[in-house]
Image (cartoon, rainbow, N blue to C red):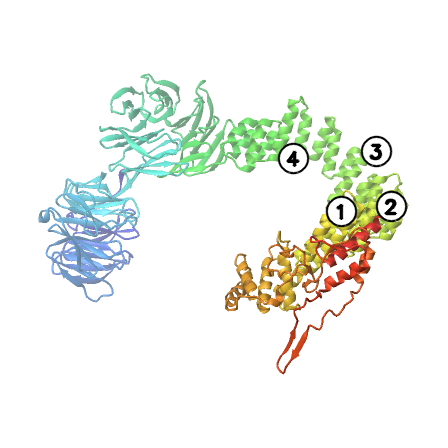
């Protein structure tokens, strides 16, 4: 930090007597300075120190002045006890007085309220008030200051107390200094920074202490010893620094925390006041002897750079290390003035007034930004330059260079011939690093820290200003005192080139032949011996890494991304593809990468082109390069052919065709043109060549016309090229029947494939007549039969089958399926018979039956099962091998037909709102169904529905016991929600009924006259004689029928005739019967004689015995007379068919 005097004035009165300057105040815009000198108020122009006007109005010494924040007025206070308000036009507008001399004045920064303080009181005045409100104090007020928000006023008093008041003058906080009245508070000031979380008050007293307090009165930090009696303390506009003056005749610069940074200026008498110009680095001081001095503070840049890490000083006492790539920052608080900074790899050295601190990174991670103290050298050094290495500190003072260890031990030193102007670490092994040193006399040296002898690299005539060495250590760039950049070959000492207007230079750390230099507001980039590429840039270049240039502008370091396009194109112009690729790797745009790839490809540098295309992710060109490399491996060496492929990929088709022809590959050129649909160019290229090639060309042209949706032209081209199949496909796909007819009639019958295609499309387009004509033309009878079947022209199909019986299956099977689909099952059955497909007929009926069950059409299901049973019987008749199986299926399907027939009425009762069946019918049907479901339950039949129906009808027919049993069985089944409530209610109400059944409903066996239970575990058979019950097909009542077998010798016809005979009925009653009638009763009494049995069955049986030579034998294992008759008829029909 340096203080440069801008202007100085000495204030005298008319008698040339020096006037003491007690206070100063800047106009908020900084253009004017108000000075309290003697009994006058002086107004200066701050730009050159010109006195604008002296203001007279006070009769005694003026002690204080203050300017309002809005710049409209300022105030002055004097020993004459008065306060005068002045306008910005230097006119006095108001004057008021106190009882004692005015010590200080201060404007509220928000409300522009003026606080004026005297020895015994203070007053608060604002333009809106007509009078001044005054408040007594118990000690002399020496100074005052408002907070930034204008809410509180701090008063410094002679008795060592700081009183903090609100806007109304009420005391809120009282701060008592340790020295008391022996340490009068002489100056106070609030920090104007808006970044601070708390309001901070700086307090300077004549106990020679500087302290800081929060608004609450809590002290911040420790007291700072000043070594003098302070007279004034004042902050910079942003609060980062403060200045302090006093009895030591100096003005010193401090940090906001009270760390002394240095002296601004020294005077010959006490410095009573000092102020900072708003928003600037200018400071003005006023002295006892009338001296008024205006200084400019120049803060020098203290920094260090190593690759992408930049360390710089901030607020004079802090060091910030910035990663220029990631923009990470870390702050190191040193709490002392930072004089020098050096950074190298993982080391950081910071010089302070009395010591040097050496820091190191916590880890080797390149992104790590955490530093810790490694060593400390407690010694005062006077040096111009400071450099840090892995194990050493290098201190430079004019011509003298010292190498110190981190413990402060001097290991070696060098004495130069001239002043050292530049020094830089250029790397090397740890403890053996090399230094690049530039001297004022133009000598450039290389020094190794472990060697006493310096190596002279070269010597030039002009002084060295900046130095840098290339990455390979072969070239040296120097900026001299004439701002010329000179580049030397270190080995030969030859000057390679020089460029003017340079103030700093840096080599690219990743490319040997690239450097950049700055100067004249431009950034200059030079690659090899190519011309310089310029762009605008303010500042100094300090580093160049890849595509990033590190530039220091004023106090800030920034990284600038510079595309390396210009030098890359310079290399490309000279066909230096590898060098251009190295430049591109530093950072160019995607378009530049593509240009590099294309230029390398045209130059047949496939390796560079491959890398560039990988960068832009162009798979198409990568495939081309891969194919060329594979062909090279196979021994191809024709570069013209390779270049022709490249031109073809780039769209340079005519150049490519010329190269193909030159290399003897005309077919490739022709294929290229045809693939690109450039048929006219292809014809021109082909000329009057081979007719076969011409035909292929026309075919390809037709393919192209087809792809671009011009099918008519494509079809005509196909015909002209003889591609009949493609023309037929195109015509058929677009429905051009007329064209298909022409083609089919023009083709010879020997050309089966195109004619078959024509017939296929005729069939597809519903022109079956033309399709039949075409099939007849080629003699494809099978396809013709299939056509008639597909179009359901059965008469034509049958006519063909009569002529050609071998196509019987091709006609009758589809015909049968069509009949079955149209519910013509009997005709379908005949058709299946003709085709010999009995299994197919059964399968169709099974599927229909399954569908009927799934759709709850149980009556239809019963019918279909009956038909299935008949079908099985026919199969058993025709196929002896399957006879047993088919007979089993016959009985099984008959059984299912009965089940679905009876379940149909139950399902209608449970699922439909109304039922046409009588309760007795539903009662018998449900019992029959439940007895038939002893083994398994067929698909679609619900036991719950059957039990529910039985329970309801049992209750209705007064079979209460049975109903209760059924309800109990329902409890063990999963009941649908729609029946749940009804079943639960019925289960409860049935218990109120008698526990017995109506005797009229009890089933009886007509063979053994045994009463059977309603629910029989054995099924529909008698529990005593095991005789099968015979049921009515409508009401399902048990019929008085018994099944029997015929004895040998009795034919079926004779049995039927015997059954049809009427049995004679005789009056078996004797006179033993007596009938007695009375008025109320009628009785019939039988005497004790034997009564002849009048059983009708026995009677008929005995009648038949009388007329037959042999009797009929009753079998207990047959089921019923009706079944017997039905079975007998079936057997009879079976025997008749067999004969």
Q: Nearer the viewer, residue 28 or 734?
A: 734
Q: CA distance from mark 4 to mark 1?
A: 69 Å
Q: Tell me the residue at 71%/66% (across/down).
A: 1094
Q: CA distance from mark 1 to mark 2?
A: 36 Å
Q: Of discs 4 and 3, which sits in the foreground? A: 3
Q: Earlier in the sequence, mark 4 or mark 3?
A: 4
The secondary structure type at the circle numbered 1 is helix
Residue 193 lies, in percent from the top left, at 28, 49
Q: Of discs 2 and 3, which sits in the foreground? A: 2
The residue singled out by tag 2 in the image is 774
Q: CA distance from mark 3 to mark 1?
A: 61 Å
Q: Tell me the residue at 53%/31% (across/down).
A: 568
Placement of the N terminus among the 4 image quadrants: top left
Residue 688 lies, in percent from the top left, at 83, 33
Residue 650 is tagged as 4
Residue 839 is tagged as 1
The secondary structure type at the circle numbered 4 is helix
Residue 796 in the figure: left or right of residue 533:
right
Q: Earlier in the sequence, mark 1 or mark 2?
A: 2
Residue 120 lies, in percent from the top left, at 11, 58
Q: CA distance from mark 4 to mark 3?
A: 31 Å
Q: Residues within 10 Å of mark 4 (few under 14, many from 20)?
A: few
The residue singled out by tag 3 in the image is 691
Q: Is residue 1068 visible?
A: yes
Circles 4, 3 touching at the beta carbon (< 8 Å): no
The secondary structure type at the circle numbered 3 is helix
Q: Of discs 4 and 2, which sits in the foreground? A: 2
Answer with the quarter of the image where residue 581 lies: top right
Q: Of discs 1 and 2, which sits in the foreground? A: 1
Residue 562 in the figure: left or right of residue 680:
left
In the displayed structure, 263 sits above or below 1057; it is above
């Amino acid at each position: 930090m340096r203080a440069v005097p801008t202007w100085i004035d000495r204030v005298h009165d008319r008698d040339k007597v020096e006037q003491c300057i007690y206070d100063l105040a800047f106009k908020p815009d900084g253009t004017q300075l108000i000075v309290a000198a003697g009994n006058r108020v002086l107004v200066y122009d701050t730009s050159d120190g010109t006195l604008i006007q002296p203001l007279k109005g006070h009769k005694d010494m003026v002690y204080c002045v203050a300017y309002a924040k809005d710049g409209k007025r300022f105030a002055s206070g004097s020993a004459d006890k008065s306060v005068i308000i002045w306008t910005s036009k230097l006119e006095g507008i108001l004057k008021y007085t106190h009882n004692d001399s005015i010590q200080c004045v201060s404007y509220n920064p928000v409300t522009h309220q003026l606080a004026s303080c005297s020895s015994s009181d203070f007053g608060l005045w604002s333009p809106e008030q007509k009078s001044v409100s005054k408040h007594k104090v118990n000690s002399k007020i020496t100074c005052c200051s408002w907070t930034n928000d204008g809410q509180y006023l701090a008063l410094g008093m002679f008795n060592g107390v700081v009183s903090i008041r609100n806007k109304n003058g009420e005391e809120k906080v009282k701060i008592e200094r340790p020295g008391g009245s022996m340490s009068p508070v002489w100056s106070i000031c609030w920090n104007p920074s808006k970044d601070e979380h708390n309001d901070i008050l700086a307090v300077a007293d004549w106990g020679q202490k500087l302290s800081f307090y929060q608004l609450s009165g809590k002290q911040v930090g420790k007291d700072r010893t000043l070594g003098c009696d302070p007279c004034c303390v004042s902050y910079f506009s942003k609060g980062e620094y403060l200045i302090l003056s006093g009895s030591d005749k100096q003005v010193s610069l401090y940090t906001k925390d009270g760390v002394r940074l240095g002296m601004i200026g020294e005077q010959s008498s006490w410095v009573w006041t000092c102020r900072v110009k708003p928003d600037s680095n200018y400071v003005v001081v006023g002295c006892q002897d009338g001296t008024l001095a205006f200084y400019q503070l120049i803060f020098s840049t203290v920094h260090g750079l190593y690759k992408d890490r930049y360390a710089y000083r901030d607020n004079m006492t802090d060091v910030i290390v910035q990663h220029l790539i990631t923009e990470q920052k870390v702050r190191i608080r040193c709490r002392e003035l930072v004089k020098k900074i050096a950074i190298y790899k993982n080391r950081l050295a910071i010089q302070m007034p009395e010591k040097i601190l050496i820091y190191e990174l916590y880890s080797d991670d390149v992104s790590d930004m955490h530093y810790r103290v490694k060593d400390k050298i407690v010694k005062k050094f006077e040096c111009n330059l400071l450099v840090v290495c892995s194990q050493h500190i290098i201190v430079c003072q004019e011509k003298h260079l010292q190498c110190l260890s981190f413990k402060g031990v001097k290991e070696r030193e060098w004495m130069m011939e001239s002043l050292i102007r530049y020094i830089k670490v250029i790397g090397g092994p740890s403890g053996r690093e090399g230094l690049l040193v530039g001297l004022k006399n133009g000598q450039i040296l290389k020094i190794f820290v472990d060697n006493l002898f310096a190596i002279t690299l070269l010597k030039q005539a002009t002084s060295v200003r900046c130095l840098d060495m290339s990455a390979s250590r072969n070239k040296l760039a120097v900026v001299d005192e004439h701002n010329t950049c000179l580049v030397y070959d270190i080995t030969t000492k030859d000057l390679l080139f020089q460029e003017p207007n340079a103030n700093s230079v840096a080599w690219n750390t990743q490319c040997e032949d690239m450097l950049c230099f700055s100067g004249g507001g431009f950034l200059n980039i030079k690659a090899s011996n190519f011309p310089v590429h310029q762009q605008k840039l303010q500042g100094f270049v300090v580093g160049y890494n890849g595509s990033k240039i590190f530039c220091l502008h004023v106090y800030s370091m920034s990284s600038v991304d510079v595309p390396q396009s210009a030098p890359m194109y310079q290399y490309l112009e000279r066909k230096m593809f590898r060098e251009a690729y190295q430049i591109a790797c530093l950072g160019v745009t995607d378009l530049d990468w593509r240009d590099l790839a294309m230029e390398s490809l045209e130059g047949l540098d496939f390796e560079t082109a491959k890398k560039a295309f990988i960068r832009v992710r162009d798979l198409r060109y990568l495939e081309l390069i891969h194919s060329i490399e594979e062909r090279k491996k196979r021994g191809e060496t024709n570069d013209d052919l390779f270049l022709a492929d490249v031109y073809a990929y780039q769209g340079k088709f005519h150049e490519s065709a010329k190269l193909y022809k030159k290399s003897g590959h005309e077919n490739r050129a022709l294929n290229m043109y045809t693939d690109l649909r450039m048929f006219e160019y292809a014809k021109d290229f082909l000329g009057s060549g081979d007719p076969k090639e011409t035909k292929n060309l026309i075919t390809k042209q037709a393919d192209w016309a087809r792809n671009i949706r011009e099918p008519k032209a494509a079809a005509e081209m196909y015909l002209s090229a003889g591609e009949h199949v493609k023309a037929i496909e195109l015509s058929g796909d677009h429905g051009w029947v007329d064209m298909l007819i022409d083609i089919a009639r023009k083709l010879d019958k020997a050309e089966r494939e195109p004619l078959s295609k024509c017939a296929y499309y005729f069939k597809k387009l519903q022109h079956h007549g033309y399709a039949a004509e075409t099939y007849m033309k080629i003699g494809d009878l099978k396809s013709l039969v299939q056509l008639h079947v597909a179009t359901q022209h059965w008469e034509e199909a049958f006519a063909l089958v009569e002529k050609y019986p071998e196509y019987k299956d091709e006609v009758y099977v589809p015909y049968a399926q069509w009949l079955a689909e149209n519910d013509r099952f009997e005709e379908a059955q005949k058709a299946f018979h003709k085709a010999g497909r009995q299994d197919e007929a059964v399968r169709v009926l099974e599927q229909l039956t399954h569908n009927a069950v799934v759709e709850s059409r149980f009556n239809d299901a019963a019918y279909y099962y009956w038909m299935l049973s008949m079908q099985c019987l026919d199969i058993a008749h025709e196929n002896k091998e399957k006879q047993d199986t088919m007979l089993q299926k016959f009985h099984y399907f008959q059984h299912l037909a009965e089940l679905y027939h009876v379940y149909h009425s139950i399902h209608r009762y449970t699922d439909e709102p109304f039922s046409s069946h009588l309760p007795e019918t539903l009662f018998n049907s449900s019992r029959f169904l439940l007895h038939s479901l002893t083994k398994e339950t067929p698909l679609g039949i619900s036991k719950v529905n059957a039990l529910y129906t039985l329970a309801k009808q049992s209750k209705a027919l007064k079979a209460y016991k049975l109903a209760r049993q059924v309800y109990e069985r329902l409890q063990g089944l999963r009941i649908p929600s729609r029946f749940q409530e009804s079943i639960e209610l019925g289960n409860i109400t049935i218990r109120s009924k008698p526990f017995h059944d109506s005797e009229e409903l009890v089933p009886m066996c007509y063979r053994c006259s045994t009463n059977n239970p309603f629910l029989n575990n054995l099924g529909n058979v008698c529990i005593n004689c095991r005789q099968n019950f015979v049921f009515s097909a409508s009401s399902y009542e048990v019929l008085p029928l018994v099944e029997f077998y015929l004895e040998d010798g009795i034919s079926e016809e004779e049995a039927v005739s015997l059954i049809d005979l009427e049995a004679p009925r005789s009056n078996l009653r004797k006179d033993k019967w007596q009938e007695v009638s009375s008025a109320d009763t009628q009785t019939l009494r039988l005497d004790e004689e034997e009564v002849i049995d009048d059983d009708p069955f026995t009677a008929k049986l005995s009648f038949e015995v009388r007329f037959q030579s042999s009797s009929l034998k009753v079998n207990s294992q047959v089921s019923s007379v009706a079944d017997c008759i039905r079975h007998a008829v079936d057997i009879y029909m079976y025997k008749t068919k067999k004969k």
